[in-house]
Amino acid sequence: MTARSTRRPTAAHSRLAAVGALAVAGALILTGCGDQTDKGGDTGSANASSASAPLADKLPKDIRDAGVIKVGSDISYAPVEFMQSGKPAGIDPDVAAALGKQLGVRFDFQNGKFDQLIVGLQSKRFNIVMSAMNDTKDRQNGIDSSNGKKVGKGVDFVDYFTAGTSILVQKGNPKGIGSLDDLCGKVVALQKGTTSEGVAKAQSQKCTKDGKKAITLQTFDTDPEALLRLKQGASVADLNDFPVAAYNAKTSGGGKDFEVVGEQIEAGPYGIAVAKDNTQLRDALQAAMDAIIKNGEYQKILQKWNVTDGGVTEVTINGGS
């Protein structure tokens, strides 16, 4: 998930203003998600003709000829992306399928660890990354937010959604957590490489500056692992993107495991990550996003997943801060 909001520091700067309660069809509990290295699966139909895919000519020729866009994604972040009946499901796969109709290609979601997705993009394993990934200046510039070091060329983002970080606690909030300040001196579990990790590290520094104890961070490859620690009482909170936090509060244990507390933190855009040197693909995706906003498909997808408040009306490039 993901944020994830690295808002999903690099892979949590990782995974919405006042999104309503998420009521998602299907009873999927995140802790049951699949292996993080397995291939996810195709989203969308086979190649469409140019007549039915009005923006096909905007794609780079190699992708147009192949008829497929390879998507790097951590498919364990419901409701943004998760496995359902052996196939990728959620907001991102649905948006990708709608984009595929405009571009005349299918989107092949390939499962991987969130903090390795940009590496996979830059090594050309993927054409794009679509994984509740927050658009941030650090990611745009190839900076590791955890240490400020240059780690790559950076990526461009096609921004298509908005989400903030939320605090998820055990049902009934037995530890009395109401804000980030309440996490000082406590154990917090979360997915590594996400914006949420950056939020937690910044708060931990604030804690010590204020004369309080630092936060003890437990980081995991996947959000379900962090959720399990919270469920077991080994941590007092999990930080993740609001849609994901709300989904887990609604579905895990029939709504009896978790609840969301406090206000959203640092709301910002999700972006489809594209290599810096692939501006033609970037611009084709922007045009396709504009098209599905105008034709209403985008809004229908957000309505399906009850996340309409996170929708955008304008598709920007590198709009994150």
Image (tube, rainbow, N blue to C red):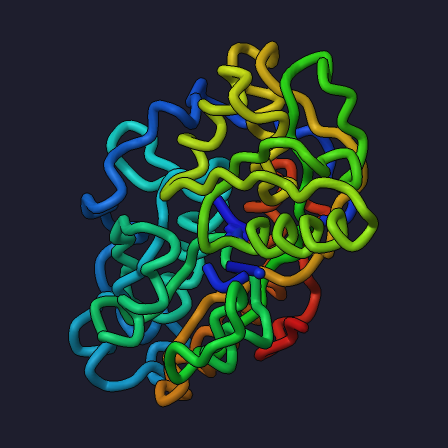
Residue at the far front in the pictured view:
211
Residue sitting nearer the eye, 52 or 56: 56
- Residue appearing at x 38%, y 63% in the figure: 129
Spot occupied by residue 220 in the image (x, y as percentages of width and height): 40, 40
**Picture quadrant where residue 29 is located:** top left
Left or right: residue 303 versus residue 149 is right
- Residue appearing at x 31%, y 68% in the figure: 119
- Residue appearing at x 53%, y 35% in the figure: 189
Residue sitting nearer the eye, 63 or 128: 128
Residue at the far left in the pictured view:
66
Left or right: residue 38 versus residue 309 is left
Spot occupied by residue 141 in the image (x, y as percentages of width and height): 50, 82
**Picture quadrant where residue 187 is located:** top right
Please say whether residue 90 is visible from this viewpoint: no
- Viewport quadrant of the C terminus: bottom right
The count of marks equals: 0
Please say whether residue 100 is visible from this viewpoint: yes
**Picture quadrant where residue 67 is located:** bottom left
- Residue appearing at x 54%, y 27% in the figure: 24
Left or right: residue 148 versus residue 183 is left
Spot occupied by residue 122 in the image (x, y as percentages of width and height): 29, 76
Spot occupied by residue 77 in the image (x, y as percentages of width and height): 45, 40
Above or below, 159 against 93 in this view is below
